[in-house]
Image (spheres, coloured by chain):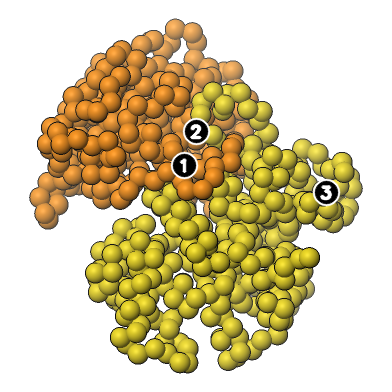
Amino acid sequence: MAKTNTALRPAAGVRPAGTILDVKDLKVEFRTDSGKVAAVNEVSFTLNAGEIVGIVGESGSGKSQILMSLMGLLAKNGAASGSVKLRGQEILGMKDDALDKLRGASMSMIFQDPMTSLNPFLRVSTQLTEVLVKHRNMGKSEAMQRSIEMLDAVSIPDAAKRIRLYPHEFSGGMRQRVMISMALLCQPAILFADEPTTALDVTVQAQILDLMKDLAADLGTSVVLVTHDLGVVASLCDRVIVLYGGRIMESGPAEILFEDPKHPYTRGLLASTPRLDEQTHGELHTIPGQPPAVATAALGCPFEPRCEYREDRCKTVRPIIQDNGTRTLACHVVSL
Amino acid sequence: MTVQPLLKIEDLKVHFPMKRRSLFGGERRWVKALDGVSFELAPGETLGIVGESGCGKSTLCRAVLRLVEPTGGRTVWLGKDFSELDGEELRLERRNMQIIFQDPLASLDPRMTVRQIIERPLLNFPNRENAEERRRQVGDLMELVGLNKAWMDRYPHEFSGGQCQRIGIARALILKPKLLVCDEPVSALDVSVQAQIINLLMKLQQQLGLSYLFISHNLSVVRHISHRVMVLYLGKVMEIAERDDFYRRPLHPYSQALISAVPLPDPKLERAKPRMRLQGDLPSPLNPPSGCPFRTRCPRATDICAAEMPPLRDFGAGHVAACHHIEA
């Protein structure tokens, strides 16, 4: 659907193949009045060139905080530790001015609500060209030309005229397109997307998902998508990470994981989602209780209090992460 | 033999006036939030109402309860003309229809205890029970909706989202209504909690014989919970059908597009499934297209669609749709 300008395509070989982002033992902690709270614990994953990785989780699972820590955007009371390497370069704990050179240029982010992430006082043209002037040292008119091409690439009709408008003059779906075009202006290696379609209607969501898929393929951009919607993950992602209580429960290629979910939490989630393509009868499967508001400092598995297969050791001993080369699983009871 | 419908809506219209452009400026303009909606709801039935934001779903809820006054049309409630009721009569009749909302915490007063919240509707009506009896009723209801009645004297902020929605449901049920209007009741909840509330609503329907108007943008949830489904677009009914019929054989191009747009939690099916993508967004309700409101995004639109609004036609078994291009 998206007609990506061929001029935007990187020449073959520009992007190094292999791992672009390597996250190891990421931990995100927040200082609160009642002591330190760890929102994310021992999260490790890699992102390959051109790959779309989905992080699924419910509210409070820490999924957004992973992205925020990678972008260096944690709240003041937050701190990340561990290691995050972008093309081999350690970016965790980098100074803001060094990080500024990467943000927008090598990695960029789109958010759930496109209205609150665009400046309502500035024309779209100002907000788009600023990115190129700052990161690419372009002149105003060249930046303008490039921005119009980019709006065109995300299928905004009549881009040359629409670029003069203010954010409120766009509909929700169009605003999200503007956000995506802004994020991709400098052809970043990685796009972080935090619930990019949650605020949109399904028909518009389908357009945006198509667009992201096409752009990732055409520009070779790697995407980390955070969402609570299993359908969105299934339609867009190559690999999936299932997060609960700030820890990875299970991860693997989307196709395998959806066909044969191993972790009791993933299984429970899939079973409790009503299906559009088949009639579900009677009671839906439920997971008792509710997700923890903040990651618990439990010794064992964070899902233990709600798990129907729990054993005594689940409460006291943290499951070691099983890894068979294609997928990982953190569970005492089920094995890969 | 047909059962008398609990609720019969005929040609319901809600038009909101716009600000005049200038002091002398021309004709007053109207936003037609609902424009000629008709449907029936049987006792014990769930009618799912779907459509994109701005299609009039929530206005419909409010107009049925007369929380906004309809501009035109009739609401027949148990054989009586509900739209004619006034003042005290209206207030007393409304006992039988209650509403639950999307944001569970925002719809509860933070300064009232759960007991005060749930029993509050009782105080509005004559023959109110004494405090002891009210307390007993609140306790019973809390157990019915799956809350521990020992928590009666706690405040809403001490509860999770799913529990707050249960409190909202208990409050709606204390007057023993016949109709429960559910305005996106599970949209704000986490997936694992959503299923609990859906199960609760279905159990309550069976136990108490409730009818639901169930509004949701989530077509999978609607498929699970509804008996019939109604599709709205820019204030007009596009299609009404029995649940299974609707999902197997959606007739209206808009319904087909809606169903096709929902991503399935299965990568293989997702890749294989035929795609139908709508272009653009919902047109502004301020300035809706002539004729069929959907024609600007419809893949099958022709000249006749711009000229006249297609009437709802019956395609058998109560499956009605409004489109010029459906073969009978």
Mark 2 neighbour class, 10 Å CA radius: few under 14, some 14 to 19, many 20 or more: many
Q: Residue at x 66, y 86 (%)?
A: B85
Q: Earlier in the sequence, mark 2 or mark 3?
A: 2
Q: Residue furthest front?
A: B1
Q: Are marks 1 and 2 in contact (CB under 8 Å)?
A: yes
User: Which of the chains bears the disc numbered 1?
Assistant: A
Q: Are marks 2 and 3 in contact (CB under 8 Å)?
A: no
Quarter holding the N terminus of chain B?
bottom right
Q: What colour has chain A?
A: orange
Whether residue A102 appears in this view of the structure is no
The label nearer to you, 2 versus 3, is: 3
Q: Mark 1 belongs to which amino acid?
A: Thr
Cα–Cα span, label 2 and label 3: 32 Å
Q: Mark 3 belongs to which amino acid?
A: Phe
* Position in image of residue A324 (x %, y %): 29, 14
- Residue at which label 3 appears: B315
Is label 1 in a helix, a strand or a loop? loop
- Residue at which label 2 appears: B265
Q: Residue at x 73, y 40 (%)?
A: B249
Query: Are the residues flagged by discs 1 and 2 from a single subunit?
Result: no
